[in-house]
Amino acid sequence: MRRREFLKAAALGATAAGIGCQRPLRTSRGERRPNVVFILTDDMRWDALGCTGHPFLKTPHLDRLAAEGARFANCFCTTSLCSPSRASMLSGLYAHAHGVTNNFTDYPNALPSFPRQLQAAGYATAYIGKWHMNEESDERRPGFDFWASHKGQAKYYDTEFNINGTRSVLKGYYTTRVTDLAIEWLGQRRPDKPFLLMLGHKAPHSPNTPEPQYEHAFDNVKIEYPATAFALEGKPDWIRQRLDTWHGIYGPLWGFRKEFPDRRPEGVAAFAAFCRAYYATIKSVDDSVGRLYAALAQAGQLDNTLIIFTGDNGFFLGEHGMMDKRTMHEASIRIPLLARYPALIRPRTVESAMVLNVDLAPTILSICDAPPLPKVHGRSWRGLMLDRRLGPPERYLYWRHSWFYAYDYEKQFPYTPNVRGVRTDEWKYIHYPHGDGGADRHKAELYHLKSDPLETRNLIDDPAHTPKLAELKAELQRLMAAAGALPDRMPLDEGVKAILPEKSIR
């Protein structure tokens, strides 16, 4: 699409947004409502940032967001799969409640979302980039005045977009082009009307294709299988069996291996090439953040904008012999989260409390002083930012110390079973309920994360931890019951029955 054609489509979207508001909208506290820029990546690991201490990936623009705002060191997705996690971010709900339990289901039109709430509160709203719910549709979704997206996964080069009903192939590199669209849209905004811009990147989703300037950025970086790749003693059988599947370390995830399975010692070279390309695509995302930052600063809107950067789910790069996501292990469930808004967030904040993807919707609406969504499972972390003056013991009295995880088996991807589990500040219990209600098919997992952050020692059969296991089983059921989730026919043994259901643990 040529620039003139885009500007015409953008103008139509701006007209539809009703940008002729003559006065700045104010919060109930008398403050100007902040703008929101929400940047979402696909399959990005929590530690794929320079500010987390990555050994070779440098992300100066993302690091600046962390330096001028907050980095959430313990942010998690409640289902490690793209569409369910994205729906949880929009709705503040677990997957069992919003209904998007796989990558082929769209966000329900009748379901409230934080963009719809902001739109109703007078915000101009735009979605640009990868939507990734319902692979077969590129139609505008409710809650957005301006829409620029596409069907399915798209391509790293030359993707066809639907821009407010006009379909055209945008020539060039995906990350660059969606950033172009975002900056053009920002240029259309009236300064007296708050806005929400959501930008969905394709990167670093497979098949990873860096742009030319970063194609060889990490050629000299030595990459081998991680130390935990083959340390599978005590793990369930399905994890060992996964080694040679599509989502295993010897498998052909998105074709990065020419042979399948590839157990050759030199097969690590293909794995290393995959990892280099994965990280190289994030360099372009970092550049995109820098461009958006500059555009907001030039427009005089930087400090009046809540900038949120996050990912939909984590990603295995060989840990426990796995690629992909879906499971409840740390590499799969941990996601990056950075936030900048000087009116609320102090510079160089590192928040250690456990926050979830379901917290994003209530947090954004709270900061924008917009009506809350009904009956959400998430909580606003605005209070955590306000209470930085208090020490952790006082601040965390009212915050969560446990949460539950849920993933439902997909027949299209039969490499991961049903998963239900609970994570606390120090412990993790993972349960694999059988789909037909029979006995559990797979060995459960129990980890003491404080002493074993890499999850190398499964304590499930250790008699010394039987009381803790019973405690965690009870906590899992308590959390699921509180969220209205089904108990998955998990039998309660006598040890679990002895635990009071209202007891919350760490």
Image (cartoon, grey):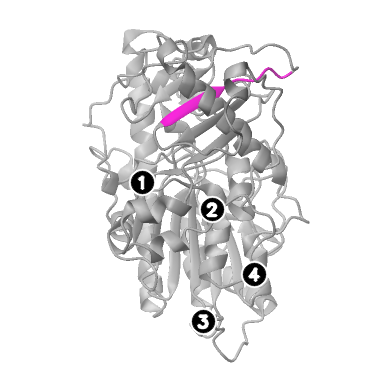
Q: Is residue 216 visible?
A: yes
From the top left corner, tell me how far across and down residue 420 is, in percent: 59, 28
From the top left corner, tell me how far across and down residue 255 is, in percent: 50, 24
Circle 3 sits on which residue? 29
Circle 1 sits on which residue? 73
Q: Earlier in the sequence, mark 2 or mark 3?
A: 3
Circle 4 sits on which residue? 371
User: Identity of the amino acid at label 1?
Assistant: Ala
Q: Give SS at disc 2.
A: helix
Image quadrant where one finds the N terminus: bottom right
Residue 472 vertical placement versus 216 (above, below) = above
Say which of marks 3 and 1 sits in front: 3
Residue 375 sits inside the magenta stretch: no
Circle 2 sits on which residue? 359
From the top left corner, tell me how far across and down residue 441 is, in percent: 63, 11
x 26%, y 36%: residue: 218
From the top left corner, tell me how far across and down residue 207 is, in percent: 48, 34
User: Identity of the amino acid at label 4?
Assistant: Pro
Magenta segment: 427-435
Q: Earlier in the sequence, mark 3 or mark 4?
A: 3
Q: Position of 186 compared to 71: left or right?
A: right
